[in-house]
Amino acid sequence: MKKDNETQILGSITPEIILPIISDGAIASSGLAEARFIPILIVDTSMHTSIDDLVRLHDSAESGDVDSLWGIDKHNDHIYLHLEFKQPVKTIVALKFDILKQGGIVDTIMSTRILNLQPGKIGDRPGNTLDKPSIYVEVPDRSLKDVWTKRWKKVLI
């Protein structure tokens, strides 16, 4: 993806579309991501009820449709995952990751190209919400993989 498109998407990420991450973790599934760990993101949907609808309706739908795009802010301390869901519910959200604190989750999402998104509330943790509804979101976009690898190494060293 061209730099211009990344900048355009970052420009469209406003606080209103950021979906707060409450908690994160990982699960392994033999049928997905070649049995590697899949990140679970529990998100606060109190201001984004369309995500609750998406998860609920996705259960009865054959599949969903989502476009994804990664972007790094100009200060290089956050990375964003812009998600545009097209069906079964149309909605746009962005996940904001602090590179220092959540870089491991970002790296895993980029490697597995999938994440598990689960609506939740403050205090929820993956260990006590595995029975709650969630959806798997494919994240095939790897346009920032090289930039990410360099940035992640800097943080680790």
Image (cartoon, helix red, strand yellow):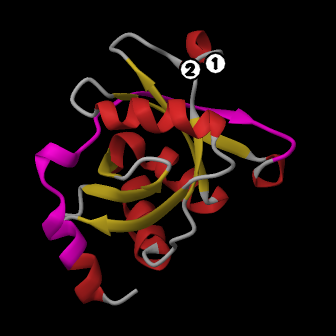
- The type of residue carrying mark 2 is Pro
Q: Give the residue type that dot 1 points to.
A: Leu
Depth check, front residue: 20 or 56: 56
Asked if the magenta segment contains residue 11, the reply would be yes
Q: Position of residue 8 (x, y in %)?
A: 19, 77
User: Which residue: 56% across, 53% down?
Assistant: 109
Q: Which residues are magenta?
A: 8-31
Q: Residue furthest right?
A: 30
Up-down relation of residue 4 to residue 7 (above or below): below
Where disc 1 sits, the SS reads loop
Inter-mark Cα distance, 2 to 1: 6 Å
- Classify 10 Å Cα crowding around label 1: few (below 14), some (14-19), many (20 and above): few
- Residue 78 lies, with reference to residue 72, above or below; the image says above
Query: Label 1: which residue?
Result: 130
Task: Give the residue at x 41% y 29%.
Answer: 52
| Quadrant of the drawing holding the C terminus | bottom left
- The verdict on residue 48 being magenta is no
Q: Nearer the viewer, mark 2 or mark 1?
A: 1
Residue 133, horizontal then vertical, whole percent: 58, 24
- Residue 38 percent across, percent down from the top left: 66, 43
Q: Check contact, mark 2 vs mark 1: CB within 8 A.
A: yes
Residue 118 visible here: yes
Q: Indicate whether 57 appears above or below 9.
A: above
Q: Which mark is residue 126?
A: 2
**Judging from the image, what secondary structure is the residue with disc 2 in?**
helix
Q: Specify few, some or many for label 2: CA neighbours under 10 Å numbering under 14, 14-19, or 20 or more.
A: some
| Residue 154: mark in rendering | none
Q: Residue at x 34, y 37 (%)?
A: 50
Residue found at x 43% / y 61%: 152
Q: Is residue 142 left or right of residue 59?
A: left
Looking at the image, can residue 117 be seen?
A: no
